[in-house]
Amino acid sequence: MEGPKILFTIPYLNINVTETVVDTWLVMAVVTILCIWLTHGLEIVPRTKRQLAAEKLVSMVNNMVLNTMGHRYISFAPYIAALFATSMIGSLSSLIGLRPLTADFSTTLAWALLAFIMIQGNNIRLNGIGGWLKGFLDPVPFMLPLNLVSEIANPISMSFRHFGNIAAGMVITSLLYSALAALSSFILGWIPNEFVASIPLFQLGLPAILSIYFDVFTSFLQAYIICMLTMVYVSGVDSRE
Amino acid sequence: MPFVSIDVWTIIMQWGNLLILLWLIKKFLFKPVMSILEARENEIKNMYDEAEEARSTADELKTQYTAKLNNARDEADEIVKTAVKTAKNTSDEIISDAQDKATALIERANEKIEVERKSAINQAKNDLSDMALTIAGKVIERDINAADHSKMIDKFIEELGDAS
């Protein structure tokens, strides 16, 4: 298996722009166009299903943030929406032949690090730097190494979980394709016609069924999980009611 | 690139991309939808306020009308009572008037009857005296001097009248 290809290099700065980043731009474009299409011509009395869908989307995200993080963090909703949309559509992009951008460890690590920064930032904001540092000595100073490990393990587990699920789906799908191709050539190989023997007959149908789990279900689930974990961890340091 | 790799520039790019998308989603999805939801909420609140106002006005009007209605009913009762009273007074007057008049009429009639009776009696007395004179004259074949005997005849008639 290959990693993401480098599509071009920005000259002078020597920045490699990979497939992942370009796919992300595509996803962003799709999401933005979808948002603009959903919200054009909004009316106080909704008359189109389009508007109802837009309102439903927004209130779903708002409710999710409200239930998980509480009303103090309602301004987090657009971030969660952006994260969810990028993650899900980025993972689902494998359905149209793109390389899923979440199958690049750098992407999921970027998101997990952002969550890590927000967690620590929120902790410092609420408890002050002293309180934040003292938190590592809780409940006894002896726990310091364990606390550090648990804090650092958060972004690592988060990023590897997401990356692993999508990348594994990709790997399994391609393994399945090559296995089915081998099976096809093994069975049809007996036929002397060279063209008929080269038809990958068994690749028809079966991968689509497995794809429902490995691509569609996993994409949705992992997007949901990374959003949930981000929300839970960020609001988890807030002990206020 | 290797399958599992950490590329610093990709990480930075993905941060930037996520933040840009956050901004885009905020601008194109959340802001318009939230503002329309807020507008709707305000409108609904306004409608409720207006309905509440209308209801309180209606309640006020209702109390006013009820009070007016009660007043009107009292007034009507009063008017009817007065009318009945007046009518009764008038009818009493009329009746007593009529009674008075009737009494007066009866009295006058009685008086007249009395006068008539008296004149009739006198007439009858005169007639009788004349008849008595004539009969007596015939009986005694002699002209009775009416003037001489009228006293006696009158006495006779008087006794006759008393006997009758």
Image: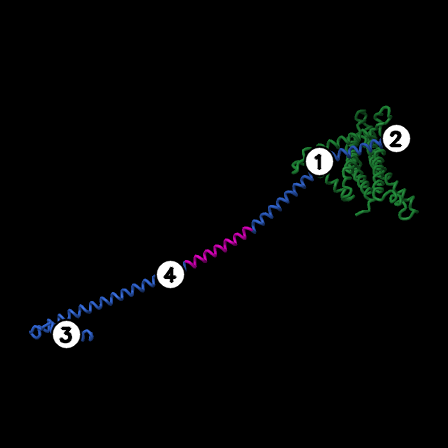
Chain colours: A green, B blue
User: Horizontal and vertical percent for residue B151?
Assistant: 14, 74
Q: Which of A196 and A127 is in front in this view?
A: A127
Crowding at dot 1, Cα within 10 Å, few <14 / some 14-19 / many 20+, comes out as: many
Q: Which of B92 and A87 is in front in this view?
A: B92
Q: Name the residue under label 1.
A: B32
Q: Mark 4 points at which residue?
A: B93
**Mark in the foreground, 3 or 2:** 3
Do pointers 3 and 1 mark residues of a single chain? Answer: yes
Crowding at dot 2, Cα within 10 Å, few <14 / some 14-19 / many 20+, comes out as: few
Q: Does the magenta stretch include residue A199?
A: no
Q: Specify the amino acid type for callout 2.
A: Pro
Specify the subunit that label 3 lies on.
B
Q: Name the residue under label 3.
A: B151
Determine whether B117 is above or below B3 in the image: below
* Helix, strand or loop for the magenta stretch, by majority: helix
Spatial CA distance of label 1 from label 2 is 43 Å
